């Protein structure tokens, strides 16, 4: 492996994330076109990456929207649980007062 291969390996992640300048990207593409070792290395790295690309502004907007929906659902669940507790306490108090009146 020569120096050129080492340099290309250093920028694989940037190349994959499309974060290189057009000139650098062209150099990587040309190198990969002619170097089978680097092509195989790049394919193996690409296959092992856990993400497909850098998150976009749209991805962040969707995440924010989902978190807001999740917060609303948690609040609704909390209110529902508090309503259950209030109903149970009302039942217990009503039973207590009815039992006390009967004595």
Image (spheres, rainbow, N blue to C red):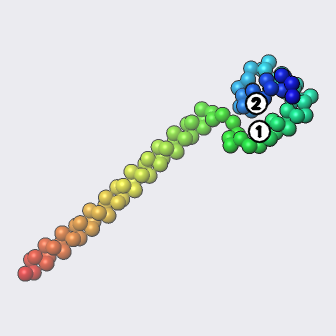
- Can residue 101 be seen here? The reply is yes
Q: Which residue is mark 2?
A: 12
Q: Residues within 10 Å of mark 1 (few under 14, many from 20)?
A: some
Q: Are marks 1 and 2 in contact (CB under 8 Å)?
A: yes
**Disc with the residue nearer the chain's start (1 vs 2):** 2
Q: CA distance from mark 1 to mark 2?
A: 8 Å
Viewer-proximal residue among 17 and 58: 17
User: Which quadrant is the C terminus positioned in?
Assistant: bottom left
The answer to whether 22 appears left or right of 2 in the picture is left
Give how far across and how far down residue 18 sits, in percent: 73, 28
Nearest the eye: 16 or 98: 16
The residue nearer to you, when weighing 1 against 67, is 1
**In terms of image quadrants, where is residue 96?**
bottom left
Residue 15 in view here: no
State the residue lying farthest toward the top.
23
Task: Specify few, some or many for label 2: CA neighbours under 10 Å numbering under 14, 14-19, or 20 or more.
Answer: some
Q: Is residue 85 above or below residue 44?
A: below
Residue 87 appears left or right of 62: left
* Left or right of 84 on screen, residue 36: right
Q: Which mark is residue 100?
A: none
Which element carries disc 2, helix, strand or loop? helix
Above or below — where is 86 with respect to 7?
below
Relative to 34, residue 63 above or below: below
Q: Quadrant of residue 58?
A: top right
- Counting the numbered discs, the total is 2
Q: Identify the residue at image location x=80%, y=41%.
A: 44
The spot of residue 49 in percent (x, y) is 71, 41
Residue 22 is situated, as x and y percent measured from the top left of the image, at 78, 20
Disc 1 designates what residue?
Answer: 45
Element under label 1? helix
């Amino acid at each position: 492996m020569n120096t050129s291969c080492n340099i290309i390996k250093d920028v694989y992640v940037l190349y994959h994330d499309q974060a290189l300048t057009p000139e650098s990207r062209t150099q990587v593409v040309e190198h990969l076109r002619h170097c089978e070792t680097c092509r195989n290395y790049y394919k193996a790295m690409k296959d092992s990456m856990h993400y497909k690309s850098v998150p976009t502004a749209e991805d962040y907007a969707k995440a924010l929207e989902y978190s807001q929906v999740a917060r609303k659902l948690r609040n609704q669940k909390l209110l529902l649980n508090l309503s259950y507790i209030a109903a149970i306490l009302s039942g217990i108090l009503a039973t207590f007062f009815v039992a006390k009146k009967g004595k």
